[in-house]
Image (tube, rainbow, N blue to C red):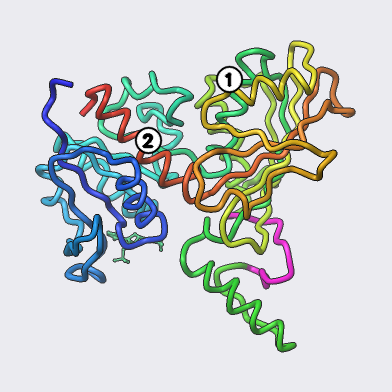
Amino acid sequence: MTKELPNIAVLGATGVVGREILNILQENNVQYKSIKFLASARSAGSTIEFKGEKHTVIEATPDVFEDINICLASAGGETSKKFAPIAASKGCVFIDNSSAFRMDKDVPLVIAGVNDEDLRLHKGIIANPNCSTSQLMLPLKALDSKYKVKRMVVSTYQAVSGAGLKAINELTDCTKTNLVGMPYEPSAFKYEIAFNVIPQIDSFCENGYTKEEMKVTNETRKILHFSDDIKISCTAVRVPVYIGHSESVSVEFENPINASEARELLKVTEGVEVIDDIDNFVYPTPKDAAGKNPVYVGRIRNSIAFDNGLEFFCVADNLRIGAALNTVRIAEKVISMELY
Ligand code: A2P
């Protein structure tokens, strides 16, 4: 390592994902020269505790990016649209959690450990994929390398924390209200989320899929460099779980596949942990994944619907691999590959 350590910043440091980014920066002992904590004018001047010390939150303004080399951003799409181009023009590498730039051809969309070489193509902005796409990439890349994906159908069961603090509070309030027999007026969701599931995440597109569902299709293709011939479809559902997205995944491959061989492959895939012993009722659940880094895979079985098909259930902490962890891992790659 010859380059001077970077000055870094966390934009959205007061948010749900921003706080998780701070936890992981500390856990992973990421090395930097200086760190800034950025948010909106609303929380500027407040303090944040990091590594046992109190730090003042600074309002994000164009000038702040002057001497920042790497910004880890999770402050919503509009904030990213406003600041990412400014930051990039000042020589800062802006790692963005929002969907604002993900499909931009000049912006690498990266899962660390899956398509790191794409980072070399960055022009100042790097995008972190959507949470549902993210957790699927580690197992899918391993399976694709050996068996070649032909077609995939995914159903998601997504935790409320993916929709921010307001949604987390709404699950609590709605549950308490329902338990005393009262109806609840939802605002973060279209319907009551307690004791319910909601088959809509984000708005609907013309083809009847939601934007969230199309993210899985389009982002998977971009990350794994799949052609349009590979067909991918998703149904995304919100469930009353605080942390941890689950996915039921059916994949058809070009090459013959059998479940026990696939299980062995996934057992040695970095970032993936296989929890799969149905004789003892062992499979992953979101409670196992909350607060942890691996993508857990279980219920691995040969598909009875597809030739050369595999079915599995995949669970991960949506705030970690689906957001903060991958953002920090990208920053670590940018530092080790000296791309700042
Ligand atoms: P603030 O706390 O000042 O509102 P969440 O997704 O949990 O709601 O968090 C969103 C994060 O993005 C918060 O840290 C929030 O800061 C930050 N944020 C929202 N709007 C802006 C903005 N215009 N400029 C900078 N940060 C913003």
First reached walking from the N terminus: tag 1 or tag 2: 1
For the residue marked with disc 2, what is the amino acid? Answer: Arg
Q: In what element is the residue under mark 1?
A: loop
Q: CA distance from mark 1 to mark 2?
A: 23 Å
Residue lying farthest front?
A: 280
Report the residue at 58% width, 44% height from top. 316
For the residue marked with disc 1, what is the amino acid? Answer: Phe
Q: Which mark is residue 329?
A: 2
What is the number of callouts on the image? 2
1 or 2: mark nearer the eye: 2
Q: Residues within 10 Å of mark 1 (few under 14, many from 20)?
A: some
Q: Position of residue 124 (x, y in %)?
A: 25, 32
Report the residue at 50% width, 26% height from top. 223
Q: Which residues are magenta?
A: 190-202
* Quadrant observed for ligand 1 in the rendered image: bottom left
Q: Which mark is residue 226?
A: 1
Q: Main secondary structure of the magenta part?
A: loop
Q: In what element is the residue under mark 2?
A: helix
For this view, does 48 lie left or right of residue 150? left
